[in-house]
Image (cartoon, rainbow, N blue to C red):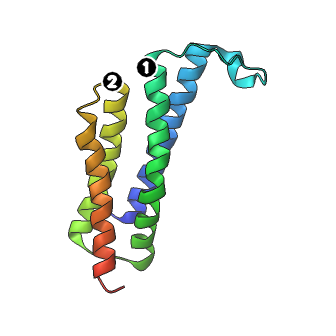
Amino acid sequence: MTYTTTLILFSVLTLIMLTVEIMTTYATQGFGFGFSSNRATDVKVPPLALRIKRAYQNQIESAAYGVPVLAVAAIVGLENANAETAALIFILGRAAFAVLYYSGIFWIRVPAFLMGTLSTLYIAYVLLTSGM
């Protein structure tokens, strides 16, 4: 998988997660919640809605380390089959992490998180050792 394709898929995944979060907020807080400037501070948030919010927040935080590494790999034209496989694993890991976070099974989402993080570290390693 190319690094540009990985960046596009990461963006699509992030937009899907944002849409899920917005729709969950409307479903749990009412449609007017999004248009109100005077929101109550003691809002009861269901556990699923809280997990959806946290999964999206984690996705945004993962962009801080994933996007720069993938962008540099795309810009310099890194050609390494293992690094391209790691890019695929990054997307699969992030998607699995989101689904597993939504499910509420906390211990099983750790391997998915590691898939995304370690694959990014591997691509960074390949970039640093490739002499580019």
Identify which residue, 45 or 32, lies in the foreground: 45
Residue 66 image point, x, y percent: 41, 58
75 relative to 88 in the view: left or right = right
Looking at the image, how many numbered discs can be counted on the residues? 2
Marks 2 and 1 in Cβ contact (< 8 Å): yes
Of all residues shown, which one is farthest toward the right? 37
Residue type, numbered disc 1: Leu
Q: Position of residue 63 (x, y in %)?
A: 47, 53
Q: Position of residue 128 (x, y in %)?
A: 33, 78
Q: Which residue is mark 2?
A: 104
User: Is residue 63 placed above or below 103 in the rendered structure?
Assistant: below
Task: Compute the Cα span from label 2 to label 1.
Answer: 8 Å
Circle 1 sits on which residue? 48
Residue at (34, 50) in percent of width and height: 91
In the displayed orientation, state which residue is furthest to the bottom.
131
Q: Is residue 71 left or right of residue 42?
A: left
